[in-house]
Image (cartoon, helix red, strand yellow):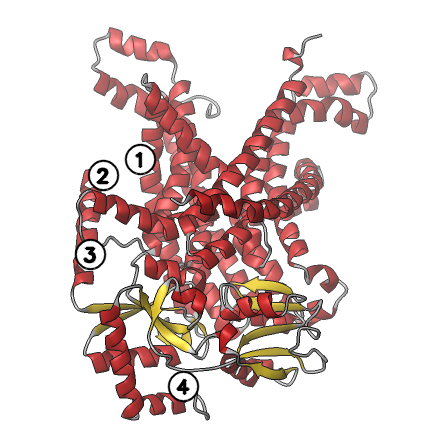
């Protein structure tokens, strides 16, 4: 037992020292296709992951990318489990109180998706009394709570599970990020589901686009990311990654 | 530790208590019926019944409750014929799916507890009951069951408390029980230590109250200690 | 029987993690359980109180809450503690460590009661007799107490281990890549929840079945030379 404790302590020391080297640990969710997901070989991939890799290459840093449940992704950063979050996290005033953000690396609005035949509309009156699925601890959950108080909100741990329930018919609609839902409709939703109404773009609720989060006060890392982001946007790397996923640009203006 | 955050979380958490209590009470009620029938089936002379009951107990005691909930909630909705059937009215609701999983789960465990209790009844008591002309049903109701439940009560009490704890898995299928509320609060406030400590305290109060209630019944059923 | 859409090896990896998790929790939990039982039977009331609080809390709080607390809160508490001791680095608690800790604490709390009962079940006059023939306390523990405690405790410990195997599934909630989470990932990809959760259920069922057979074998061994049914 004593030997085990010593081994554990030694391991903890090694891990701690590893963190002090120029090694950036980045967290993503891994359940938000096409932005971040795990493929059948167990590897993380997606738009966020490609951007993270491009930024690290630009910064000449050694990066490890880990998957982390969305619920705990900010507590994990604050607890020091990793140094940055690149996980399609919208830059919002509420989150800015907890973490620091880089400039946005993409923008997308909030969209309502429901059964194609339904006459549900993306208005406070249209959502009144409707059961709407949304991911827990997201801007979309906050948006629903504040702007559409009449809706019956069901909170999910992942967008995947939320969409499973939409398809199963347990929900009248879901509110989620526009591009994610665009991909889902293309791949999985088929003709049975469709966008309802116009996407919601008010930055007051959905923030200024997706940014990279670092711990409060870690300006050094934030500035490094910001500089690298500027470079990959200027040299065409960003556009190339964008084009490999979407036929339209999601770059911030 | 920020005490004011913990206190601020209490009203929301207590809101989750209602759902937790409702789930546990209904699951125990349905589970009791399932358990008693299963225990009798396992002790019956009909081989098919015995076999079915054994298979049910083995499966539900051998797999995680989380898997059972996910299979019923997400799994069954994979099939169009389930979604088109009448059963969908019930299966559509996360509450009923969770209740079903909890009841089937506790039913399997409790069946074993009841079976043990019934087996512990001395054989000569049953013979005596039959000898004075009691029908099997009367003998079960008036002799076997009272003795069996007294024997089984400590283990059954444990199972009841385990059910309170097991109900926390309702949070994984969108239900806002105590744990569901706590997870949402923790994600919103970024103060996991305070929120989960508060949730743990609420659960402790619940399980403590339940333990006391069970002790009360144990004393009441224990005729040797009853003052007359 | 199952079309796993190419996720077979992923589920296999997850199964291995689940097995590692269960075994690690078994080893640490046994140590905790023995320590807890020793504390509960000790003459010092602070030790008894501490062990009492430990078992009461773990037995009264859902495992899911314990796991969430350790994963999200444990890392903060641990680092505060380490820094107060003057340590400047950072200690990480990954999902595996958090899972093993939470499951070991659970196993330990239940095992405390089992061990306490088993120790109490050894007749006191045997220990007196051993002392009378001049055995030292260590020898008594090794040759009189331990073989019998082991025998009395085995059925109870086996049951706890079965519970722990099933509770490893809860660690998927904090993102440890064990069997349940791998199944969840496969579901996210293939949208076939029934297929993958049923497959996972079958694997858990085989694991508990194997553990039960193993337990039966151990019990038979421990009961060698004892007439009749095992007592505990």
The residue tagged 1 is C31
Quadrant of the snapshot with the N terminus of chain A:
top left
Cα–Cα span, label 3 and label 2: 22 Å
SS at badge 3? helix
- Mark 2: few, some, or many residues within 10 Å (few <14, many ≥20)? few
Task: Examine the rendered structure and indicate whether residue A167 appears above or below residue C108.
Answer: below
- Mark 1: few, some, or many residues within 10 Å (few <14, many ≥20)? some
Badge 3 or badge 2: first in the primary sequence: 2
In this orientation, which residue lies closer to the viewer: B147 or A32? A32
Instruction: Indicate which label's residue lies in the foreground, 3 or 2.
Output: 3
Badge 4 or badge 3: first in the primary sequence: 3
In this orientation, which residue lies closer to the viewer: B150 or A187? A187
Rendered residue at 35%/45% (across/down): C101
The residue tagged 2 is A1
Chain letter, disc 3 residue = A
Badge 4 or badge 2: first in the primary sequence: 2
Instruction: Indicate which label's residue lies in the foreground, 4 or 2.
Output: 4
The residue tagged 4 is A252
Cα–Cα span, label 4 and label 3: 37 Å
The residue tagged 3 is A16
Instruction: Indicate which label's residue lies in the foreground, 1 or 4.
Output: 4
Rendered residue at 57%/41% (across/down): B164
């Amino acid at each position: 037992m004593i030997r085990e404790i010593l081994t554990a302590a030694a391991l903890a020391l090694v891990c701690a020292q590893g963190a002090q080297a120029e090694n950036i640990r980045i967290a993503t969710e891994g359940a938000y296709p096409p932005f971040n997901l795990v493929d059948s070989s167990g590897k993380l991939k997606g738009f966020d992951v490609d951007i993270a890799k491009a930024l690290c290459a630009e910064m000449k840093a050694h990066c490890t990318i880990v998957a982390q449940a969305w619920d705990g992704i900010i507590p994990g950063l604050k607890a020091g489990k990793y140094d940055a979050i690149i996980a399609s996290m919208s830059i919002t005033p509420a989150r800015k109180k907890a973490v620091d953000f880089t400039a946005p690396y993409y923008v997308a609005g909030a969209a309502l998706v429901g059964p194609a035949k339904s006459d549900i509309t993306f208005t406070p009156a249209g959502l009144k009394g409707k059961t709407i699925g949304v991911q827990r601890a997201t801007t979309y959950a906050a948006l629903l709570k504040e702007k559409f108080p009449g809706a019956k909100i069901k909170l999910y741990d992942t967008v995947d599970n939320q969409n499973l329930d939409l398809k199963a018919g347990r929900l009248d609609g879901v509110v989620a990020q526009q591009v994610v839902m665009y991909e889902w409709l293309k791949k999985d939703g088929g003709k049975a589901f469709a966008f309802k109404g116009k996407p919601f773009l008010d930055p007051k609720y959905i923030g200024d686009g997706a940014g990279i989060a670092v711990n409060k006060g870690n300006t050094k890392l934030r500035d490094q990311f910001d500089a690298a982001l500027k470079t990959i946007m200027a040299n065409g790397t960003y556009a190339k990654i964008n084009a490999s996923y979407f036929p339209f640009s999601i770059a911030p203006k | 530790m920020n005490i004011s955050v913990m206190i601020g979380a209490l009203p929301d958490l207590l809101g989750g208590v209602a759902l937790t209590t409702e789930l546990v009470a209904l699951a125990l009620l349905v589970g009791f019926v399932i358990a008693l029938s299963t225990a009798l089936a396992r002790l019956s002379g009909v081989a098919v019944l015995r076999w079915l009951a054994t298979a049910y107990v083995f499966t539900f005691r051998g797999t995680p409750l989380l898997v059972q909930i996910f299979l019923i909630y997400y799994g069954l909705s994979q099939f169009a014929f389930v979604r088109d059937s009448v059963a969908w009215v019930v299966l559509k609701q996360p509450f009923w799916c969770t209740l079903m999983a909890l009841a089937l789960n506790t039913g399997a465990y409790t069946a074993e507890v009841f079976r043990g209790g019934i087996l512990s009844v001395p054989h000569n008591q049953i013979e005596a009951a039959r000898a004075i002309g009691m029908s099997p049903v009367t003998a079960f109701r008036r002799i076997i069951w009272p003795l069996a439940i007294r024997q089984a009560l400590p283990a059954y009490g444990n199972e009841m408390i385990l059910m309170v704890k097991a109900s926390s898995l309702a949070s994984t299928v969108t239900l806002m029980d105590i744990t569901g509320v706590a997870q949402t609060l923790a994600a919103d406030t970024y103060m996991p230590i305070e929120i989960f400590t508060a949730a743990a305290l609420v659960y402790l109060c619940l399980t403590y109250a339940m333990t006391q209630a069970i002790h009360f019944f144990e004393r009441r059923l224990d005729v040797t200690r009853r003052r007359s | 029987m199952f079309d796993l859409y190419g996720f077979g090896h992923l589920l296999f990896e997850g199964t291995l993690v689940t097995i590692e998790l269960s075994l690690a929790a078994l080893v640490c939990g046994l140590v905790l359980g023995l320590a807890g039982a020793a504390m509960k039977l000790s003459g010092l009331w602070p030790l008894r109180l501490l062990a009492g609080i430990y078992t009461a809390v773990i037995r009264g709080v859902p495992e899911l809450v314990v796991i969430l607390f350790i994963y999200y809160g444990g890392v903060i508490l641990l680092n505060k503690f380490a820094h107060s001791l003057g340590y400047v680095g950072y200690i990480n608690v990954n999902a595996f460590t958090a899972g093993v800790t939470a499951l070991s604490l659970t196993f330990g709390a239940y095992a405390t009661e089992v061990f306490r009962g088993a120790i109490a079940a050894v007749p006191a006059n045997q220990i007196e007799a051993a002392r009378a023939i001049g055995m030292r306390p260590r020898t008594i523990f090794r040759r009189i107490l331990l073989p019998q405690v082991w025998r009395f405790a085995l059925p109870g410990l086996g049951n706890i281990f079965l519970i722990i195997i099933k509770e490893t599934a809860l660690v998927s909630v904090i993102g440890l890549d064990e069997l349940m989470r791998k199944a969840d990932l496969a579901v996210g990809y293939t949208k076939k929840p029934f297929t993958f959760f049923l497959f996972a259920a079958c694997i858990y069922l085989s694991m508990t079945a194997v553990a039960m057979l193993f337990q039966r074998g151990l019990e038979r061994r421990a009961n060698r030379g004892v007439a009749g049914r095992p007592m505990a």
